[in-house]
Image (cartoon, rainbow, N blue to C red):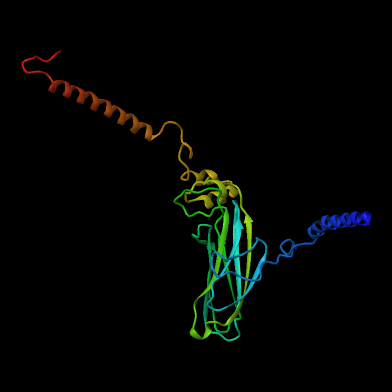
Amino acid sequence: MRAIRVLGVALLTLGLAAAPAAADDSPSPEASGDGRGPTRAGTSFRTAAEVEQGQTATARASTGDYLYWSFPADAGQRPTVTATVKLPESHAAETWQIDVYDGLRRRQACQYGAQTRTAGADAASVELECVLRTVRAWSEPWANDPLPGTYYVRLTALRLSTADLGQPVDAELRVGSKDMGGAVAVDGALSEPLVPGIATRAEADEEKDDAAVLAGLEPEDGWTSGWWSDRWIWTAVGGALAALAGVAGYRLTRGSGRPPGVPPTA
């Protein structure tokens, strides 16, 4: 009997050890790799449904609801948010809009894309798109630059008729990004100065006629001037004037402090 109990305990221990391994082998919904995202949307920033880049999120809602999703974005990425709303069969003209906020809930401007669109009464769906600016690795405290972290998407209808409120709609959200990298994500280094004629110079390079075009585009010493420039002249003049003013002030102060009847010193 004792041997049977020992054998039973050993088999039970072996089963408990094998259970986690079997669970690890089974794929999770998030790791399936089919690009499917959540099938619901939040109603506020706190309840926003999490979406990974490359996934497609879906949600059934009613016209007039606020739908929220969240997604991560790292430095060097330029996120693109695309939303499609399938409208009911019978509806009036509706205006839909997507807004993107960063982790501090600051609204981020769209670099380009149809962020707001109006669907006519005969439209079956409406598509929206917002291409954000490239996420920077750092920013000034006063700036509103996109930084690495969580971003929130809000989808809603702006102008609705009373008859359209509460009608069922199907929403689909897709989030992706392009890896920009380089100076765009780190600093403000320019590959070319911001002056007119850059396109003209590029065309001149092709025609091998740089001399005529570049004559009025660059300073004589180039964009990084030498040590000698107008600022050195004004610095020298300012220093000389300051020295003369100091000498004059010293002589005036010394002369006004002489006792009466004492002749001035040579």
* Of residues 250 and 239, the one drawn nearer to the viewer in this rendering: 250
Q: Residue at x 14, y 13 (%)?
A: 265
Vertically, is 222 above or below 260? below
Quarter holding the N terminus is: bottom right
* Of residues 249 and 258, the one drawn nearer to the viewer in this rendering: 258
Q: Residue at x 17, y 24 (%)?
A: 253
Vertically, is 75 above or below 230? below
Residue 95 lies left or right of residue 56; in this view the side is: left
On the image, the x and y values in percent for residue 13 come to 84, 55
Q: Residue at x 60, y 70 (%)?
A: 41
Please identify the residue farthest to the left as the structure is shown.
261
Residue 23: tell me if it is visible.
yes
Quadrant of the image occupied by residue 6: bottom right
Residue 1 lies left or right of residue 188; in this view the side is: right
Quadrant of the image occupied by residue 14: bottom right
On the image, the x and y values in percent for residue 29 come to 73, 65
Residue 113: tell me if it is visible.
no
Residue 56 lies left or right of residue 106; in this view the side is: right
Quadrant of the image occupied by residue 72: bottom right
Please identify the residue farthest to the top as the structure is shown.
266
Quarter holding the C terminus is: top left
Please identify the residue farthest to the front as the structure is shown.
1
* Of residues 61 and 217, the one drawn nearer to the viewer in this rendering: 61
Marker count (numbered)? 0
On the image, the x and y values in percent for residue 80 come to 60, 62
On the image, the x and y values in percent for residue 120 come to 54, 81
